[in-house]
Image: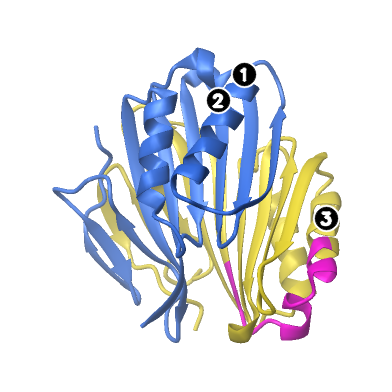
Chain colours: A yellow, B blue
Amino acid sequence: MQRLGRHLLVELFDCAPDILNDLEAVQTILLAAARRAQASIVGSAFHQFSRFRLSGVVVMSGSLLSVHTWSEHQYAADIFSRGEVFRPDVVVESVIAALGAQRVSVLEVQRGIFPTSLAHGVVLGARSAPATYQYGKVTGQPTGLG
Amino acid sequence: MQRLGRHLLVELFDCAPDILNDLEAVQTILLAAARRAQASIVGSAFHQFSRFRLSGVVVMSGSLLSVHTWSEHQYAADIFSRGEVFRPDVVVESVIAALGAQRVSVLEVQRGIFPTSLAHGVVLGARSAPATYQYGKVTGQPTGLG
């Protein structure tokens, strides 16, 4: 089985709302996380849409790191993809700590699987009850971290 | 159940390799797809890493559209998130057609679900055998489009 990329869907709950509202702070956190993983940063774009919402993305050589915040819910979603050239777990842990998240869920999706199947996901967060679906079969039960 | 965002993981197989290699063409396609969905574009970043690989991202008000290509495999992965303010299906169809993909898989993941569970996915592509997992239960069987 060939896999072209890893894609981590990270859900961060109960974050520090003052950080989630702060475009400059979020930008600093994401860029620092990328550098900490020794990623080569080739571009970035950050934008605050409203008092409570901002989006940011860092394009790295071989990976993408993005964040979308809903600070009124103390929630942020992070995405890391094509993480072949650096350790995405290092980035995830860095962002979790910086945003002060109290609850975290990480869903890893294998991207670009050849030749038979396409979507292939493993819930990383719920280590006691891992879930895998691949090749059209569902095994295990995905759960939140509670 | 409250959901903060929709996230579409799009896998595009058997794309036209000459397009996937062309940074300017991919940039034009993504920006056109965003505009077609009447999204407000606030930033973008595109980068060609090698002869066969490029990444691009368009940050829109409320959404993110990105592409990562492996042209030697005629494969591209697209991501659309926080698609509350425009129709992500319009964007997906536009990109599929422009890249000449012959096989497509779309996995929709609901992001930011409160209060009990986190990851919640529905395979959209395999309409005859839809799969849903939510709240720690697995129902149905996700399959590729074959």
**Which element type, helix, strand or loop, lies under badge 3?**
helix
Measure the C-alpha gap from mark 1 to mark 3: 26 Å
Check disc 1 and give the amino acid type: Phe
Residue A32 x/y as whole percent = 86, 58
Start-end of magenta stretch: A11-27
Q: Are marks 1 and 3 on the same chain?
A: no
Q: Earlier in the sequence, mark 1 or mark 2?
A: 1
Q: Which residue is mark 2?
A: B70
Q: Is residue A114 visible to us here? A: no
Residue drawn at (85%, 67%) of the image:
A24
Work out whether residue A75 or residue A115 is closer to the camera in this orientation and state it: A75
Check disc 3 and give the amino acid type: Leu
Q: Residues within 10 Å of mark 3 (few under 14, many from 20)?
A: some
Which chain letter goes with mark 2? B
Residue drawn at (78%, 67%) of the image:
A26
Work out whether residue B71 or residue A114 is closer to the camera in this orientation and state it: B71
Check disc 2 and give the amino acid type: Trp
Q: Which residue is mark 1?
A: B52
Measure the C-alpha gap from mark 2 to mark 3: 25 Å
